[in-house]
Structure formats: C-alpha cells, structure tokens
Image (tube, grey):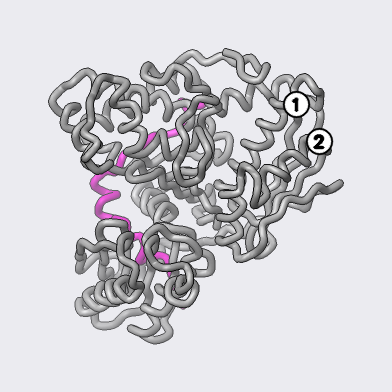
Amino acid sequence: MNYLGINLEVKHLPELDPGFIPLGRFFEAFSATAKEPFGIAVERSCGQVAVQETCIHGTEEYFAADVYYIDRMVKTLLWMKGGFRVYLRGNEKVAQTIRERYSLTGQRAFDADFMAGVYERPFEVLLVDELPQEKGAAQAIGRHLSGCRIGFDAGGSDRKVSAVIDGESVFSEEVVWFPKTTADPQYHYDGIVSALKAAAAHMPRVDAVGVSSAGVYIDDRAMIASLFLSVPKEIYDEKVKDIYIRAITDTFGHIPYAVANDGDVTALAGAMSLEDNNVLGIAMGTSEAAGFVDADGNITGWLNELAFAPVDASPEAMMDEWSGDIGCGVKYFSQDGIIKLAPVAGIELEESLSPAEKLKVVQGLMESGDSRAARVYESIGVYLAHTLAFYHQLYGYRHVLLLGRVMSGKGGDKLLETCKAVLQDEYSDLYGRIHLALPDEKFRRVGQSAAAASLPEVK
C-alpha cells in the first residue's frame, strides 16, 4: 500500500472498506524514513501544554506527505488534549502551510473556531524557534464515597440520577427528556433541579453533587455541549455555561460539586469496577465518545473528543458533515459507521428511518443470523483493532472499556471477536499488554450516575 509516496504494510483490511488506510500505520511508515526534526506544542487552559517531538522529510519530493503528517498530528493533539494555541518549530514552509490551514479561513476553520469557543481565547498558530515545556494538571477526582451524595448523568435522550449514601445507591431514577431539540434553557434547568430534588428526598441531607454530562467542561462550566444544541447562541453564555452550578447552588446552597465530561466519568466508573487504573473508555452510540483515567487514577483535563480525531488516511474516506473533514472517528465508531457499511453489504435501509432506527434494523438482522450484518460488524472490528493500536500510541492505556449501542447484542460480540483476532495477528506485542472489556454487572452496579456522585471531595 502506498500513500503520498509512503509505503506501508497492512495485513488486515475491512472487507467492506478495502480502501481504509490505518492512520497509525501511516504514521509508523512515515516516521521510519523521516529524519528532519519538527516540534509541535499545543497550549490549553491554565498554562497546560502538550508537546510532540517528531520528524519530517523536509524535501520537495515529500512536501505533500510532510504537510499531511503534521496536519493530522496537530488535529489529533487538538482533539485529544485540547488547545487554543499551537506552536510549530521546524521547516518553515511546512509550518507556514499548517498555519494557513488552521486559520479561520483555512481548511481547518472548524477546528480553530471550535477551540476558540471552548477556551474563550482567539485561536492561533505560532512559528517559533523553541517550544514551551510540557505541563499537565491531572486531577485526583472521584472515588469519594463517604456521606450523602447525588450523582446526575445527563444524556441526550434520558437523564439519570442516583442518591448514594456511603457508596451504596439508595435511589435511582431515569427520566426521558429532549434536551437537544429544546431551545429554552429553562427546560434544561428545570429538568436538572427536578432530578436533584428527587434524589435529595431519599436522603437525610445532601453533602455533595457530582454531574456527568456530554460536552466540554472547564471549571465545571459547559463550554460546548450537544445537550444545548438548540439554545440560541446569544443567550448561551448567560443561561447555559453555569447551568449546573446554578442548579446545584440554587437547590442546596454552597456545597461541594463537580461537573465532568461523561466520557471521563465512564472511564472512572470502569476503573472503579475493574479496581485498576489506566482506562480508556469508548462509547459507540450517536457519536464516538471517549474518556480516560490515567495510570495514577486521575482525570487528565484533556478534551478526549475522539469523534473528531482522524483514524483513516484514505483520501476517499467519508466526510463528517459537522467538521467538514474526512476520516474522523465518528464515521467509524458510531451508528454512522453501521449505516455507512450496511448498503455495501447489500442491506437496504429506508431513507425515512432515523439513524437510530437504521441501526436497529442492522442489529435485528444480526440477531437473526444474517451474514450481511455480520460482515458489517466484522469490518468495524477491523477498524477498531487498527485504531486501538493507534490510540495506544497516544494514551498508553492498559484497559479499554467498550460501550454504547453499537456494542450491544450479537453485533457487539462479533465486532469484539474480530477486533481481538486482528490485534493478536497484526499487533501481537500489544495484544498481550492490553485488556479489552465490556460492561459487566459490577460496572452496571457502579453505574454512570453513581460514579458521578463520587466526583466531588467533601472536606
């Protein structure tokens, strides 16, 4: 296989998408022949910096490959770690091309604009002679079980709340709601308060509240979140960014609280159930959600928005409608991946069906033993094996917890079986060092909302 003059070997390709080029394999092959030093640093909130030292070829012959490699590396770092400022050190022509791409008028305008919104700072790319030093701020958050706590888990289709006393759930409630399609933020506020009051009614007091919610949260504030997609931009800052803080303090006064991304809380719940650390959680549902608990049991403060991180180097990869980029994780590890491959396998899906309904059609065929559906899940299993090897280069995880509707039923079993077989054959060194897990009964007992309850520390 050859792309942009880089030769790479791939033993396993998805049957339904033979043009797939695993980005991790491309990175490996590119780096094997690149010798000219090039440095990247990405700065995020509170002076935190992620640094990546690498090499490019630095020749006219490999200019396109060099630009592609640095472009994908910058994008990966942005969506994994987050940042409003990118520093580039090295080949000026390559660096200048990347700066133009990541401007508000360039090919990566979506990424630049998104990051500017998250961090409330103008996004910029700087060409420098020296990179800033690496700096992190991992937090030992969660696993606090003492006292009377409330855990709230805000999902796109339902909200869950738990009342937890000394680590034991004494009450749980799940309520259907429609946050993504509702424009009035009072609806969201009232739903949150209603859930908090329902849990509080089952405890003698409330010592702390923890919240798990889809979106990007910095200092407990909702910087960008799909739950509030329909709320007009002109009232978002005033009515949404502090919505959880207001709901908690209006209801209980000034008590300890913590708000975290639902992917990180999923990884925390997995770490609690596995009784170990270094856990990458990946949920394949409407999108690809992810979270990470590091080797010390800390939440890193990284974005972990892997739906927008690239995984496929093929120039023919499917485009993500939101970001306008191709080869991003959302089109491989969500219901979109199923919908993309089903017609290739010979499964006709009615256009009038919603994405969730289309997924159910394929799941139903899989449950009945349809070989076409099996081919869909096998192809996604191949995608996943190559991508988990790539993610390991980024995270160095020990455990992967796989969740979400795509992983349910016989389809999930087939997907996992294929993924393990490819890992064992093509990445044998890695296969023996990592553990792939599905949610078990212990995880379900911990649960997302119960894990959220453990987030704040009560001093």
| Crowding at mark 1 (Cα within 10 Å: few <14, some 14-19, many 20+) | some
Name the residue carrying label 1: 63
Between 247 and 344, the one lying in front of the other is 344
Where is residue 193 shown, x and y percent of the image? Answer: 29, 77
Which structural element holds mark 1? helix
Tell me the residue at 63%/14% (across/down): 7
362 over 438 or under it: above or below: above
- Tell me which amino acid carries mark 2: Lys
Within 10 Å of disc 2 (Cα), the crowding (few <14, some 14-19, many 20+) is few
Q: Is residue 285 left or right of residue 289?
A: left
Which is more N-terminal, label 2 or label 1? 1
Extent of the magenta region: 430-459
- CB contact under 8 Å: marks 1 and 2: yes
At a point 48% along the width and 22% down the height, the residue shown is 20
Residue flagged by tag 1: what amino acid is it?
Phe
x, y percent for residue 202: 20, 76
Mark identifier at residue 93? 2
Q: Is residue 344 visible?
A: yes
